[in-house]
Image (cartoon, grey):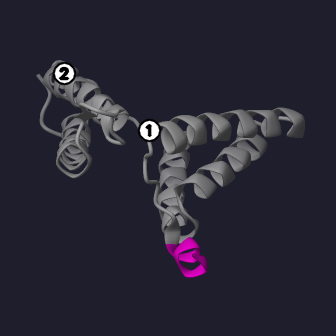
Amino acid sequence: MSKFGVKQIVPLAIAAICVLFIYTGLTKFGFWDATSGPTPAFVPTIISVVLFVICVLGFITSFKDTKESKFYKEEFLVIGAAVLIIAATFLIGLLPSLAVFLVLWLKLVEKTPWKTTIIILLFLMALVIGVFVLWLGVPFPEGLIMDLIG
């Protein structure tokens, strides 16, 4: 049995964030409206519940692993990208920051050709806007710049 460390802290931290998302989704937006169907919190709540269960299982099974944790620089690239997306969300909004991230990741990290990058960007933005904005009515953060403009 391993000692308490990173392998236990990470699942607990993510589980705590899941609980926050579930609570916010259910109390602020609701889950299902009897007249209009799913609310904006429908999909995020389901994903948060599934992720919470996975985190609990990961926490329980983490004590069986006795190997020491290893960290690689590529992992910190993903963490850094997530931090930059969160910072950009406060400035330009979530959807534009995700679009910028997608283009930068595909061009700089994956070395994808421009044609493929643009096709993927258009497809994913159409999917996200169509499903979450138009159909489910999810209110995405707009950021400081969009608040100043609008």
**Magenta-highlighted residues:** 144-150
Quadrant placement of the N terminus: top left
At horizontal 49% and vertical 36% (from top left) the residue drawn is 135
From the viewer's perspective, is 64 left or right of 122? left
Q: Which mark is residue 136?
A: 1
List the residue tagged with mark 2: 57
Local crowd size for mark 1, using a 10 Å CA cut-off: few (<14), some (14–19), many (≥20): some
Q: Is residue 52 visible?
A: yes
Q: Is residue 38 above or below residue 64?
A: below
Q: Position of residue 59 (x, y in %)?
A: 17, 28
At horizontal 25% and vertical 24% (from top left) the residue drawn is 54
Whether the magenta-drawn stretch holds residue 103 is answered as no
What secondary structure prevails in the magenta region? helix
From the viewer's perspective, is 132 left or right of 113? left
Q: Is residue 73 visible?
A: no
Q: Position of residue 51 (x, y in %)?
A: 28, 29
Quadrant placement of the C terminus: bottom right
At horizontal 24% and vertical 40% (from top left) the residue drawn is 18
Q: Give the amino acid at mark 2.
A: Leu
Q: Which mark is residue 49?
A: none
Q: Position of residue 2 (x, y in %)?
A: 14, 27
Q: Quadrant of residue 102?
A: top right
CA gap, disc 2 and disc 1: 30 Å
Q: Is residue 117 above or below residue 86?
A: above
Q: Nearer the viewer, mark 2 or mark 1?
A: 1
Q: Give the amino acid at mark 1.
A: Leu
Whether the magenta-drawn stretch holds residue 147 is answered as yes
Q: Secondary structure at mark 1?
A: loop
Q: Nearer the viewer, residue 50 or 44?
A: 44
